[in-house]
Image (cartoon, rainbow, N blue to C red):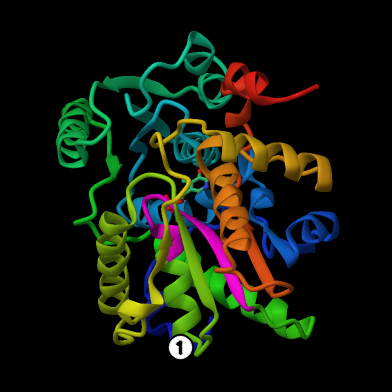
């Protein structure tokens, strides 16, 4: 790994991803949007239907292994992709997995609680606990620590993957590494990107990629599309992750305030909730490229990209890289909502 990433090699890592993921052209969608659109296929990172969480969890599982853990504890939304991939990784390690499910998305029907990532988690053997709040990260972290204490008393060796922004953003290191992968791929194909568009949720993916690119001296614009919080709150979160990365790696503050670009125009009505622009983006991408996007994350992010192409934030005919962060199994949990929007 490049020395530009400072102490990265000091952080233990369990390889879980099939890398590198390909970058594909999206010619029919490009024509539709008046851009040269490319897609980084991080939906194909391999483990358990892939997605961005395989890169992130490599570092949490590395830390857990270094502490001789035999049990993973993690919090996520009911249809969390993070939980699904963590459960698959735990299965591979021969470890137990305990999951705290937050009620983040109100008003969903029973399909949401049964299929998609829930079904896959059941197959993987997750033990579930419910946390009735969706916006109380400190409370959720405290509750899962209490579960870990109980397991410790039973002789288990639990490792908690925390939620709150005060913890070192270990998961972002996976996307610091991904930045080197993207830069090498673009150099090999002699392609220069004008912009990269990526989902911004916990912010590990956005902050990690942005930090990695700047550490490598790349000044391509990175647009984070807000899928969880408005751009004001998200800006603070990305800035704090980037400062933490600088400290963890010992490479200085390579990300400036003006490097943090956020778009929250397609977030409403809120996390994990459909809106017409997202449904249109999912259908357009499927019908132009045969490629599936999920409602909470990649569909919303593509809706943001389409909006920014429409208002010329992304210049006509510019080279734009969309990072497909996965989430595919979640599509099934949104079946009734999607069906509602789709014209036959
Ligand atoms: C978690 C997730 C994201 C958001 O990534 P963060 O690192 O949390 O910002 C984007 N896409 C998919 C499919 C996800 O599961």
| Residue closest to the eye, 227 or 86 | 227
Q: Which residue lies furthest to the front in this view?
A: 311
Query: Mark 1: few, some, or many residues within 10 Å (few <14, many ≥20)?
Result: some
User: Is residue 208 at all visible to an observer of this figure?
Assistant: yes
Q: Position of residue 18 (x, y in %)?
A: 67, 56
Give left or right: position of 224 versus 66. Answer: right
| Residue closest to the eye, 242 or 229 | 229
Q: Residue furthest top?
A: 110
User: Is residue 171 at all visible to an observer of this figure?
Assistant: no
63 is within the stretch colored magenta:
no
Give left or right: position of 304 versus 23. Answer: left
Q: Position of residue 20 (x, y in %)?
A: 69, 65
Image quarter (top left, top right, bottom left or bottom right) of the N terminus: bottom right
Q: What residue lies at 58% left-to-right and 39% top-to-bottom?
A: 278
- Highlighted magenta segment, given as a residue range: 194-206
Asked if disc 1 is less than 8 Å from ligand 1, the answer is no
Residue topped by disc 1:
4
| Residue closest to the eye, 194 or 294 | 194
Location of residue 78 with respect to 24 vertically, above or below: above
Q: Where is residue 122 in the image (x, y as percent from the top left)?
A: 51, 19
| Residue closest to the eye, 301 or 162 | 301
Image quarter (top left, top right, bottom left or bottom right) of the C terminus: top right
When asked about the image quadrant of residue 124, the answer is: top right
Q: What residue lies at 36% left-to-right and 79% top-to-bottom?
A: 258
Helix, strand or loop under label 1:
helix
When asked about the image quadrant of residue 263, the answer is: bottom left
204 is within the stretch colored magenta:
yes
Location of residue 133 with respect to 66 vertically, above or below: above
Location of residue 223 with respect to 339 vertically, above or below: below
Q: Position of residue 163 (x, y in %)?
A: 28, 45
């Amino acid at each position: 790994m490049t020395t530009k990433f400072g102490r990265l090699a000091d952080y233990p890592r369990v390889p879980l991803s099939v890398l590198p993921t390909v970058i594909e052209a999206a010619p029919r969608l490009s024509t539709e949007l008046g851009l040269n659109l490319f897609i980084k296929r991080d939906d194909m990172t391999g483990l358990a239907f892939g997605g961005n969480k395989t890169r992130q969890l490599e570092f949490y599982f590395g830390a857990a292994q270094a502490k001789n853990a035999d049990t993973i504890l993690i919090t996520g939304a009911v249809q969390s992709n993070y939980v699904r991939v963590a459960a698959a990784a735990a299965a591979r390690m021969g470890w137990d997995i305990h999951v705290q499910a937050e009620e983040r998305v109100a008003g969903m029907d029973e399909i949401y609680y049964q299929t998609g990532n829930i079904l896959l988690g059941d197959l993987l053997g997750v033990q579930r606990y419910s946390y009735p709040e969706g916006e109380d990260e400190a409370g959720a972290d405290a509750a899962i620590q209490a579960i870990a204490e109980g397991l410790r008393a039973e002789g288990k060796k639990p490792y908690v993957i925390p939620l709150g922004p005060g913890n070192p953003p270990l998961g972002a290191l996976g996307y610091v590494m991904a930045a080197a992968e993207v830069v090498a791929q673009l150099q090999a194909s002699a392609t220069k990107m004008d912009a990269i568009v990526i989902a911004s949720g916990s912010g590990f993916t956005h902050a990690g990629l942005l930090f990695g690119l700047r550490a490598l001296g790349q000044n391509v614009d990175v647009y984070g599309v807000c899928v969880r919080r408005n751009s004001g709150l998200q800006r603070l979160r990305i800035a704090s992750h980037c400062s933490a990365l600088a400290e963890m790696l010992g490479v200085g503050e390579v990300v400036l305030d003006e490097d943090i670009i956020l778009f929250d125009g397609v977030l409403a009505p809120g996390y994990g909730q459909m809106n017409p622009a997202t449904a249109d983006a999912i259908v357009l991408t499927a019908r132009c490229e045969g490629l599936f996007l999920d409602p909470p994350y990649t569909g919303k992010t593509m809706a943001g990209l389409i909006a920014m192409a429409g208002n010329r934030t992304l210049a006509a005919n510019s080279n734009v890289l969309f990072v497909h962060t996965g989430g595919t199994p979640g599509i099934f949990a949104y079946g009734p909502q999607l069906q509602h929007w789709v014209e036959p």
